[in-house]
Each structure stands twice: as structure tokens, then as C-alpha cells.
Amino acid sequence: MILLETARLRLRRFTERDIERLVELDSDPEVMRYITYGEPTSREEYEQDILPRWFAIYATTPLLGYWAAEDRQSGEFLGWFHLRPDRIEPEHQELGYRLRRAMWGRGYATEGGTALVGHGFGPVAAASISARALIGHLASQRVMHKCGLRYAGGFVFPQHVLEDRSESERAGVKYCITREQWAPPT
């Protein structure tokens, strides 16, 4: 199922056939630098935990979830985006993204993120959308800002999100936008 398309992107549901792409994406230490401090995600974790959780989201909330990002022309796998209930503050929908390193700096994160913010305030009818990043992840913070989200302050990721990390290593920033603050593209 295709969720949405932009000028250059197609966001679609993941299938079990995507597992190699996901493992490859998470095997790049630079991609994972601000997520797990460079630790890869194993194939086993995708098979036993992550993909079943994503498929359950599709079954219960079909307009939310994790979406494979593909180049609209070539079909090349670029990474993924998500819009789902926020793990820390469930009153928000949370925007997230992870792209292959070769795709960085090309505007894909902003393009996909902006489209998902519109989707969140459109068909999903969200009251607010948030996004978070580790404090040092400035590129991700720029994307959040370009997607219309506003700096909402610093916080510390809970221990269960970044296990075995000190409080300073879990320091992050939150960006947020409400329906009232959002201006749809003209």
C-alpha cells in the first residue's frame, strides 16, 4: 500500500521482502550514529521484534506507521519515515526518518517529513506532531525546523530508549507543532 507520493518520493508500507534493505541501512555506523551510537540493528531483531511491531501498527492504525521511502522514478530504496503515536508523550504523533547516507543533503528528509506533517494534520487529524533528536544531531534538527516544527526544549531520552547510556549521552531536543500553528502549503 502506498501512503503518499511527493515530487520525488513514494512512501509505502514495508513488507517482509524489505528486511535486507533495513539491515543494510542500519549497518552503516554513520546512519546509526545519533540513534544507537553506531550500533547496527540485527536481522534477528528486525525479524522477531521490529517488523512484527510495524505490521501490527498497520493493522490497528492504517494511516500511521513506518513507511519505506523510494525514489518515485527509479524505485530505489532511500530509507524510511514514520508517523506514529509518540513513545514518550502519546498525546502527540511523532515524526521520524532514517535515510541511507548517500541520500543525505538532497532534501529528501525535508520533503518526506513535510508531506507526513501534512498527512498528520490532514487524514490523521492529529492535534500535534513532535520529533526528537540527540542534542548533537544538528542536521536532523534543521530538518525538523524546515518541516515547520518549532523548538520545544531539551529533555533526556528515557533509559529504555537508549539503554546503557549516561544521562548526558541521552540528552536531546524536542520540536513540536500544533494543528493551529501549522500552515498548509499553498
Image: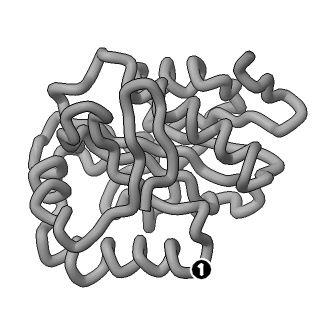
Residue found at the far front of this picture = 73
Q: Is residue 162 above or below residue 57?
A: above
Q: Residue at x 52, y 80 (%)?
A: 59
Q: Position of residue 13 (x, y in %)?
A: 39, 61
Q: Quadrant of the C terminus?
A: top right
Residue that badge 1 annotates: 60
Name the foreground residue: 122 vs 139. 122
Whether residue 33 can be seen here: no
Pointer 1 local density, CA inside 10 Å: few below 14, some 14–19, many at least 20: few
Q: Quadrant of the N terminus?
A: bottom left
- Using residue 163 as the reference point, say whether residue 96 is left or right of it: right
| Secondary structure category for the residue under label 1 | helix
- Using residue 178 as the reference point, say whether residue 162 is left or right of it: left
Q: Residue at x 33, y 63 (%)?
A: 14
Picture colour scheme: one colour
- Using residue 32 as the reference point, say whether residue 89 is left or right of it: right
Name the foreground residue: 157 vs 129. 129
Instruction: Please state the total of marks drawn on the protein image.
Output: 1
Name the foreground residue: 60 vs 32. 60
Q: Position of residue 148 (x, y in %)?
A: 66, 23
Q: Is residue 107 above or below residue 94?
A: above
Q: Residue at x 68, y 47 (%)?
A: 120
Q: Residue at x 38, y 41 (%)?
A: 10
Q: Is residue 106 above or below residue 85?
A: above
Whether residue 154 can be seen here: yes
Name the foreground residue: 147 vs 155. 147
Give the residue type that dot 1 points to: Thr
